[in-house]
């Protein structure tokens, strides 16, 4: 019998990245969707040939025809929905980042552990061919011993803030921070996947544009699970554009991007090779297949609640100084954020 899925929050991310994949992978079907605005849920169901729609999350979760639930809402509601799914004894697949902070992730892990059902998170790059090839090259010793990692991302996303209404990704209550959570989490998670969990993490963040309260520039340092030193920088208020993962070893280097379709590049003293491995049309499809296989007892999903919580812990370590700690409901006390106050005082430079 196929795994029958329900989606909570059938917004933009589900239109092409994920939603269609639930009925494309083997032994899987999308049978129900939910959105608070029922007319939008009904429209989604009609366009994607989904049998049922709801405007209430509880109704979808308790639908006896739904075996597993995909939570595709902003991070601010992940914990609430996840706890309800766990209480119903059903597996969940949660969008990334897993939650607003590591403390919420721990609550989710505890709930699913008590319920005895698995929790997966949509760090889907762990199943994409480009990143699997990079991991394979490194594990086969093609660049020797890994000695350094450089992560760089820059984009003029500050230009996209127009008027008084901010998108949810720029509101800490909904997103858990700024675009660092939404975008950098992908990069940090894939480095965890390729090189092992990050330790000795530290960093700084600032807001240089005053277009919103959350951070727009971040720098960090870390140690990888394999013992290499790494650095990262993210500038979401940059004139220039850059998207680079660079992993250097004693005998070569692997470079690729997080978000593009750029080929994986291997450079050694003997050769330079590129590997064209474009993303599939529905980018989450390979990971969703691995989740279905996991649930049916014929495989293992590489992106779990445990692995995703590690990435949230790293994010908290990097951003703790900006928010004055991230173990509490920091989104409710923006006037006390040290990073915001410091940025306001020094923005003239």
Image (cartoon, grey):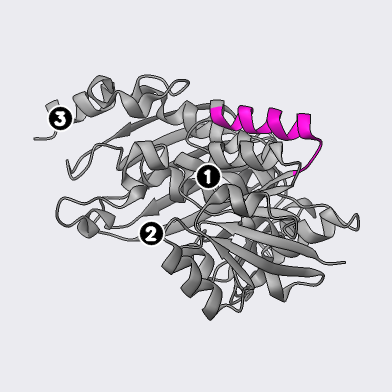
Q: Is residue 90 above or below residue 46?
A: above
Residue that carries the numbered disc 3 in the rendered image: 344
Which x, y percent locates residue 305? Answer: 68, 40
Which x, y percent locates residue 139? Answer: 77, 51
- As helix, strand or loop, the secondary structure at mark 1 comes to loop
Q: Main secondary structure of the magenta part?
A: helix
* Marker disc for residue 171: none
Q: CA distance from mark 2 to mark 3?
A: 26 Å
Whichever of labels 2 and 3 marks the residue nearer the N terminus, that label is: 2
Residue that carries the numbered disc 2 in the rendered image: 242
Q: Hey, which quadrant is residue 309 in on the image?
A: top right
Q: Which residues are magenta?
A: 104-118
- As helix, strand or loop, the secondary structure at mark 3 comes to helix
Nearer to us in this view, 231 or 277: 277
Which residue sits at x=68%, y=49%? 62
- As helix, strand or loop, the secondary structure at mark 2 comes to strand
Which numbered disc, 3 or 1, marks the residue closer to the eye?
A: 1
Q: Is residue 70 above or below residue 282?
A: above
Find out whether residue 336 is within the magenta segment. Answer: no
Q: CA distance from mark 2 to mark 1?
A: 22 Å
* Marker disc for residue 97: 1
Q: Hey, which quadrant is residue 4 in on the image?
A: bottom right
26 relative position to 36: left or right: right
Which x, y percent locates residue 314? Answer: 54, 32
Q: Is residue 151 above or below residue 31?
A: above
Which numbered disc, 2 or 3, marks the residue closer to the eye?
A: 3
Residue at the far left: name it.
Answer: 348
40 relative position to 132: left or right: left
Q: Tag 2: Cα neighbours inside 10 Å, few (<14), some, or many (≥20)? A: few
Determine whether label 2 and label 1 are within 8 Å by CB: no
Determine whether label 2 and label 3 are within 8 Å by CB: no
């Amino acid at each position: 019998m196929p795994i029958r899925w329900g989606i909570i929050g059938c917004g933009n991310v589900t239109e092409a990245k994920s939603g269609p994949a639930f009925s494309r992978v083997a032994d899987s079907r999308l049978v129900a969707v939910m959105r608070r605005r029922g007319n939008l849920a009904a429209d989604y169901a009609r366009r994607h040939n989904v049998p049922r729609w709801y405007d209430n999350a509880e109704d979808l979760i308790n639908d006896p025809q739904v075996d597993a639930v995909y939570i595709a809402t902003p991070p601010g509601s992940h914990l609430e929905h996840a706890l309800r799914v766990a209480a119903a004894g059903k597996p969940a697949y949660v969008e990334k980042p897993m939650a607003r902070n590591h403390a919420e992730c721990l609550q989710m892990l505890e709930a699913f552990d008590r319920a005895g059902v698995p929790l997966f998170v949509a760090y889907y790059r762990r199943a994409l061919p480009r990143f699997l090839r990079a991991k394979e090259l490194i594990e086969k010793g093609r660049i020797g011993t890994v000695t350094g990692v450089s992560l760089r991302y820059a984009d003029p996303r500050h230009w996209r803030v127009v008027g008084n209404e901010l998108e949810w990704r720029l509101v800490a209550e909904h997103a858990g921070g700024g675009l660092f959570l939404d975008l950098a989490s992908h990069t940090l998670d894939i480095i965890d996947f390729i090189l092992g969990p990050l330790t000795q993490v530290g960093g700084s963040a600032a807001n240089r544009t005053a277009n919103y309260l959350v951070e727009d520039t971040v720098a960090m340092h870390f140690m990888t699970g394999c013992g290499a030193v790494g650095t990262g920088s993210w500038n979401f208020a940059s004139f220039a554009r850059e998207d680079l993962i660079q992993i250097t070893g004693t005998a070569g280097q692997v470079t690729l991007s997080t978000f593009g379709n750029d080929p994986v590049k291997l450079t050694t003293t003997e050769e330079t090779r590129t590997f064209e491995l474009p993303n599939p049309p529905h980018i989450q499809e390979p990971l969703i297949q691995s989740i279905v296989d996991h649930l049916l007892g014929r495989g293992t999903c590489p992106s779990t609640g445990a692995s995703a919580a590690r990435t949230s812990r790293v994010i908290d370590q990097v951003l703790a100084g900006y928010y004055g700690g991230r173990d509490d409901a920091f989104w409710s006390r923006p006037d006390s954020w040290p990073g915001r106050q410091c940025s306001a005082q020094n923005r003239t430079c």
